[in-house]
Amino acid sequence: MKNWAIVIGINYYEHLPLKKHLKCAVQDAEAMKAFLCNSAGFPSENILFCSDRSQPISNIPTRPSRTNLRRILFEKSLQAFEADNFWFFFAGHGISKNWQDYLLPCDGDANDPETAISIRDVVDCLRRCKAKNIVLVLDMCREGELQPSGSRGVSEVGEETIKITYQQGIITIFSCQLGKESYEIAELKQGAFTHVLLNGLQQNMILRQLEQYLRREVPALNRKYDKPVQEPLVIPEPGLKYDLRLFPELAKTKGNNNNLRFEPTATIDVDSRGQLQTPSQRDRIQQQIQVLEAIIEDAKSNPSFANVRERFLQLRKETTDFLSEEVGKKEALTLVMICPRGDFKTDKARLLNEATQIRNYLLTLSQKLN
């Protein structure tokens, strides 16, 4: 198999105060590289590794600055053309500006997206290589105030990433849910998410099993070390990959894992929703619920109502289009009818009311799939 990966870990940030630096991101990246090399069948020369202390690759510096990372993405990644597997792992800070997601390089300014690496550029580079299987793993701090020391959390980061990777058919694994935080465990010298992720990957789970394992074990690990709740988010696109192993090569040595504790997903009968029971459609509804919940929370607390309004109007249109095109006309019509349409120029209460009703309708629709 032809396997490639880009692995990035950043602890030190030139333009952030010391208390906002991370302690375990580099170790997480090094652990991921070791797993890919030693267990998953990735040749070490096929792993483009960038961290605070990484060595040059063919005389190309790998310090995770914006210039170096863009060179890795736009030039070196072309060597992965038509790879069987192409993994992208990032442990560090992330930001969101103007509804666009960015990874923050070591020399990036959290207030200036021009100094960051856009997720759209990352996805474009991964897709350009035409790999059969692309996996994006993001264990990152998300904007807001870049959160307290020892956490990697978000307010808005992830919304654009979900949309882009869903459209491009890329499996995406976030360290936490939208609007939540990702934590480091000092005693383990690792992030909670990456620690559990690597344990799960070593067991050669299928993606569906891995998702359940992450959602169970990451919160348990955080409780053990007195950290707040953290639950990873998996975007399984395309849906058919939900039941495939991420590393087929591991199956030769790990067996079939028949003893794993795994709760199978329930099925439903086909009705007016046609193929609504497929994983990709069900998960798309759940993703939209999460984005709606973030919008509702921001509308309650964010003084910049115009930004929230634009995000809601865009999501409402996308949700209606999705239901109409991929679920069923009946469901789309119901969504249109449950609320009066409007652009909510200044009426925050009206927006909150409609957003809440749409969320409740999607929750009801999603529950029918359980």
Image (spheres, helix red, strand yellow):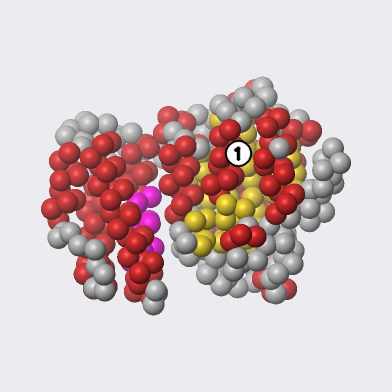
Lateral position of residue 154 relative to residue 150, left or right: left
Give the quarter of the image for residue 279: top left
The quarter in which the N terminus is drawn is: top right
Task: Name the quadrant containing residue 221.
Answer: bottom right
Looking at this rendering, what residue extends furthest in the front direction? 114
Q: Is residue 168 above or below residue 162?
A: above
The residue lying at 67 percent from left, 42 percent from top is: 73
- Name the residue that disc number 1 marks: 125
Please state if 314 lies on the left or on the right of 41 as rendered: left
- Which region of the structure is painted magenta? 287-297
Report the front residue among 153 and 197: 153
Count of numbered tags: 1
Q: Residue at x 21, y 69 (%)?
A: 350
Few, some or many residues within 10 Å of mark 1 (<14, 14–19, 20+)? some
SS at mark 1? helix
Residue 189 in the figure: left or right of residue 132: right
Q: Could you tell me residue 231's position as x and y percent?
A: 49, 56
List x then y, in percent, for residue 135: 57, 38
Q: Is residue 369 above or below residue 341?
A: above
In the image, residue 38 above or below residue 196: above
Q: Position of residue 134 (x, y in %)?
A: 56, 35
Residue 17 rendering spot, x and y as whole percentages: 70, 74
For the stretch drawn in magenta, what is the main secondary structure?
helix
> Foreground: 83 or 269?
83
Q: Quadrant of the C terminus?
A: top left
User: Is residue 5 visible in this depiction of the protein?
Assistant: yes
- Residue lying at 24% horizontally and 73% vertically, measured from the top left: 347
Residue 313's place in the image compared with 48, above or below, is: below
Do we see residue 247 in this rendering? no
Residue type marked 1: Cys
Residue 295 is inside the magenta segment: yes
Please report the residue visible at 60 percent of the width from the left and 73 percent of the height from the top.
148
